[in-house]
Image (cartoon, grey):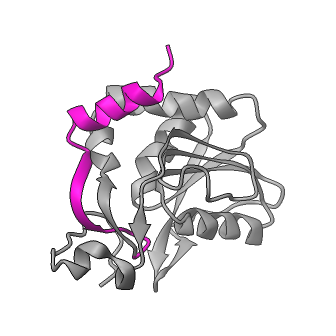
Amino acid sequence: MSLNETEILNIFKKTEALLEGHFLLTSGRHSSVYFQCAKVLQYPEYTEKICRIIYEHFKDRKIDTVIAPAIGGIVVGQEVARQLNKRFIFAEREDKSLSLRRGFSLKEGEKVLVCEDVVTTGGSVFEVIDIVKKCGAEVVGAGFIVDRSNGKVQFGVPQMSTIKMDVVSFPPEECELCKQGIPFVKPGSKKIL
């Protein structure tokens, strides 16, 4: 049985993964809401159920490999690849940009699914799509758990998310929370400061 958005949000609340406050997002933007997917993904039963939605959406497509940006997308990509019974690789930051390391590679014509945990501006997913294309491989889709843009970010490939929400975020210079002197926290994995 597939989970609906309300059930997924309840899992985020139950695992204390839906946070409220003042946050510096991986994108560099600020928000009063933060999805800490790692707190959900620490539980295999939730990981399997949520990633099954992505699997179900893409299972009938020809896919050779699943790729994700490190670090947030690794668990999502690994679980989707496990359910598809396909190879999984990840891209990681080196000198501020994502690249394939650890001997990972893609072949020309390889069919690749990109997975991620949370999309705000889509920067990491766009970077991974660019890596795939530069290798001569084909992006067949992008699947992620949370779409903070509520569908505004489009990757030019078939895409889906398990949750779509229009969560407001601001460039730092326009952040009302900063103007009120409320300090931010940075719970994500990418070093921005």
Q: Can you give x and y, in whole percent of width and height, for residue 184 in the image?
A: 20, 72
In this picture, residue 100 sits left or right of residue 78: right
Tally of numbered discs: 0
As displayed, is residue 174 above or below residue 32? Answer: below
- Residue farthest to the left, as pictured: 182
- Seen from the viewer's position, the closer of residues 88 and 132 is 132
Magenta region: 1-28
Q: Is residue 130 within the magenta segment?
A: no
Residue 125 image-quadrant placement: bottom right
- Seen from the viewer's position, the closer of residues 83 and 31 is 31
- Seen from the viewer's position, the closer of residues 72 and 136 is 72
Residue at 84% x, 56% y is 109
As displayed, is residue 121 above or below residue 3? Answer: below
As displayed, is residue 121 above or below residue 161? Answer: below
Q: Can you give x and y, in whole percent of width and height, for residue 139 in the image?
A: 74, 54
Q: Can you give x and y, in whole percent of width and height, for residue 157 in the image?
A: 75, 52
Q: Is residue 24 within the magenta segment?
A: yes
Q: Can you give x and y, in whole percent of width and height, for residue 189 in the image?
A: 32, 66
Residue at 40% x, 73% y is 29
Residue at 78% x, 59% y is 137
In this picture, residue 187 sits left or right of residue 174: left
Residue at 35% x, 29% y is 46
- Seen from the viewer's position, the closer of residues 172 and 79 is 172
As displayed, is residue 173 above or below residue 125? Answer: below
- Residue farthest to the top, as pictured: 1
Q: Quadrant of the C terminus?
A: bottom left
